[in-house]
Image (cartoon, coloured by chain):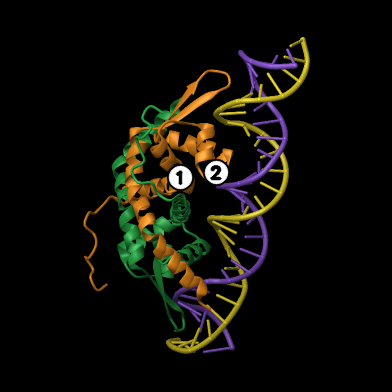
Chain colours: A orange, B green, C purple, D yellow
Amino acid sequence: MLQPEQKSPDPVDPRVEMLVNELIGRVADKWTLLVLEELEEHGTCRFTRLAQLVPGISQKMLTQTLRAMERDGLVHRTVHPVIPPKVEYRLTDLGRSLGEAFCGVWHWAEAHLGEVEAARAEFDGRD
Amino acid sequence: MLQPEQKSPDPVDPRVEMLVNELIGRVADKWTLLVLEELEEHGTCRFTRLAQLVPGISQKMLTQTLRAMERDGLVHRTVHPVIPPKVEYRLTDLGRSLGEAFCGVWHWAEAHLGEVEAARAEFDGRD
DNA sequence: GCATATACTCTCCAAAGGAAAGTAGGCACC
DNA sequence: GGTGCCTACTTTCCTTTGGAGAGTATATGC
């Protein structure tokens, strides 16, 4: 404890902190993030298009992820009662704000990709 | 295609995009994020302390997460050759920069927690 | 010589995730 | 009028991942 009061700028309610952690755990999901990116980039999309856009997602996980995102208020689901079925997904304002929040992470990934690869090479090269 | 050129500000190499996606998938992991937060907040930590700090992580996942983060160059692992063993973990500059990138996500979670809960209640209330 | 303290590691079992086939139902085609 | 297509799932089966808890190594204090 060299610098005891170094970091406690805002004494947050531990109950809130727990809920935030839980929410982070829910939202910091590989597929959620990837779906979010594609919806942000391409706007309104249908199910099959999303399945093509997101690299290796299975139909099951796409359905599951979209449902969870809908439940959390991140995407809006529009069902057109036609045959064959037509369902459109688009980000809500909340979803778009999350996308913006994750923006820094994408920039980080782009910017530090080389460093991560170098670190991996170095790590794997150790005997 | 109402606005064809609406969003393609930087024509990124698709190969880079793939690698970024892969990196995002690796880093956007519940435990990675939570461990990152604790290391950011508490500085250098030992294994057991981290296990206490991160809500419900198992020893196996903590080991696995720390190893992966070390491999990616996010944390530095210092082994003190004493008995009983003493191993310290701290963020590297790279890890700290990732923490800052995720900062926006935490703020988002804190700020929009209520909205997400409301959305869930509304969703669950539908018949 | 026996418990202790620490950072794992191993084993076993449950849960999550992927692949592929199945479902519903109006419509075009033969 | 029967067949198959189209789309958004759903179901089934099997593999992989993750969690709980016990085991491991070993110098030190009692």
Residue at which label 2 appears = A57
Identify the subunit bearing mark 1.
A
- Residue under circle 1? A34
Q: Is residue B34 left or right of residue A56?
A: left
* A13 relative to B120, above or below: below
Determine the secondary structure under disc 1.
Answer: helix
Q: Are marks 1 and 2 in contact (CB under 8 Å)?
A: yes
Amino acid type, mark 1? Leu
Badge number at residue A44 = none
Q: Residue at x 33, y 33 (%)?
A: A93
Chain to which mark 2 belongs = A
Q: Which percent across, then down, holds residue A82? A: 54, 18
Can you see residue B70?
A: no
Mark sitting earlier along the chain (1/2): 1
Instruction: Please provide percent x and percent y for residue A123.
Output: 48, 72
Q: Give the residue at x 44% y 54%.
A: B16
Image quarter hosting the N terminus of chain B? top left
Q: Is residue A125 left or right of residue A19?
A: right
Query: Dot 2 lies on which element?
Result: loop
Instruction: Give x and y (percent) for residue A40.
Output: 39, 38
- Foreground of the two, C27 or A57: C27
Label 1 Cα neighbours within 10 Å, binned few <14 / some 14-19 / many ≥20: many
Whether residue A96 is visible: yes
